[in-house]
Amino acid sequence: MWDILLQTLPFFALIGLGYGAGRTGFFTAEATAWLTKFVFYFALSAMLFRFAANLSIGEIFDWPFVLAYLWGTLLIYLVATGVALLRRRGIEEAAVEAQCAVIGNVGFLGIPMLAMLLGPEAIPAIMMVLSVDLIVFGSLIVILITGSRDGRMSLGILRSVGLGLLKNPMIMSIGLGLVVSALGLPIPGPANDFLEILGAAATPGALFAIGASLAGKSAERVAVAGWLSLAKLVLHPAAVGFAAFYMLPVDPYAAGVMIAAAALPVAGNVYILAQHYGVAPQRVSAAILISTAASVVTVSGVIALVTG
């Protein structure tokens, strides 16, 4: 595990650098927002498009993998929802807490770190996890919150969900890359170099942005945030690992990648949704802060376990 910890330290050091820049005021909240936008819409999209354009749908989409990840994730989602309801929280707060328990920082942290530590062969599995998170659970939280407020399901809710997915650059870049791959379209040399240079900015930019965004977060409601961090860092990877190794015929290497991806800390986009809908943003902020700090040790341990 010590070797793995040393390999992950540069990634977390970049997060720490961003955190320090944010806490000292050298990097303002506005600057962090613009850096995040650059990474999200340009650098990370270029990286994902280039990855997807060199893969086939058959390499990315694997039914046993998807079902195992869905089963394990849905189990923890329901557990977190049940715990919130037992505490007499409403459906909206339960949906946000459940999202914290299962949605990890796959886009900004998982893709660069796991692809480097587990090898380029991990990319299809990471992209499957990211796609399920965005399409299934990213839609589910919007449906639950909006449906709870309206008191019913409507075509307007489904339309909003569909438009949200179409506007998500990560979904679109993966989809367009797979179209290019399926059609056998070659990427011209200068265009490929452009995508490679732009995509190379995703890793340092994303990690620095994570740290800078954490600088503005507080650790209020520590008990609840601690429980959600435990669910995300420990229960979620354990559940998907059980499904992948004991319930469905998932390739062992792909299963290891799935478990490592499930062990990532709470994603920042959960806070964006919580703030947008006005549902427990402080609670989510604390869960992101605590889970990211703890993941320095837990993620290294999980990666050491799956690679061993």
Image (tube, grey):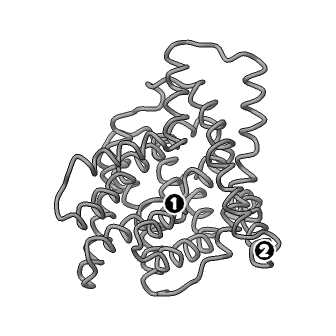
Determine the residue positioned at 70% across, 46% down. 202
Q: Which mark is residue 222?
A: none
Q: Quadrant of residue 44?
A: top right
Sequence-wise, the earlier of marks 2 and 1 is 2
The quadrant of the picture occupied by the N terminus is: bottom right
Q: Nearer the viewer, residue 188 or 2?
A: 188
Q: Is residue 19 depicted above or below 108 in this figure?
A: below
Within 10 angstroms of label 1, few (less than 14), some, or many (20 or more) residues? some
Q: Is residue 201 depicted above or below 30 in this figure?
A: above
Which element carries disc 1, helix, strand or loop?
helix
Within 10 angstroms of label 2, few (less than 14), some, or many (20 or more) residues? some
Image x and y of residue 207, in percent: 70, 58
Q: Which mark is residue 269?
A: 1
Q: Amino acid at mark 1?
A: Asn
Image x and y of residue 116, in percent: 69, 45
Q: Is residue 161 depicted above or below 63 in this figure?
A: below
Determine the residue positioned at 44% across, 43% down. 131
State how far apart marks 2 and 1 are (Cα).
Answer: 21 Å
Q: Nearer the viewer, residue 238 or 58?
A: 58
Determine the residue positioned at 46% across, 79% down. 283
Q: Is residue 263 depicted above or below 83 in this figure?
A: above
Mark 2 and 1 residues: CB-CB less than 8 Å, in contact? Answer: no
Which element carries disc 2, helix, strand or loop?
helix
Q: Nearer the viewer, residue 238 or 206?
A: 206
Horizontal relation, residue 36 to residue 81: left or right = right
Q: Amino acid at mark 2?
A: Gly
Image x and y of residue 8, in percent: 70, 59
Horizontal relation, residue 140 to residue 291: left or right = left
Image x and y of residue 39, in percent: 67, 49
Question: Label 2, on which residue?
Answer: 20
Determine the residue positioned at 35% across, 56% down. 73
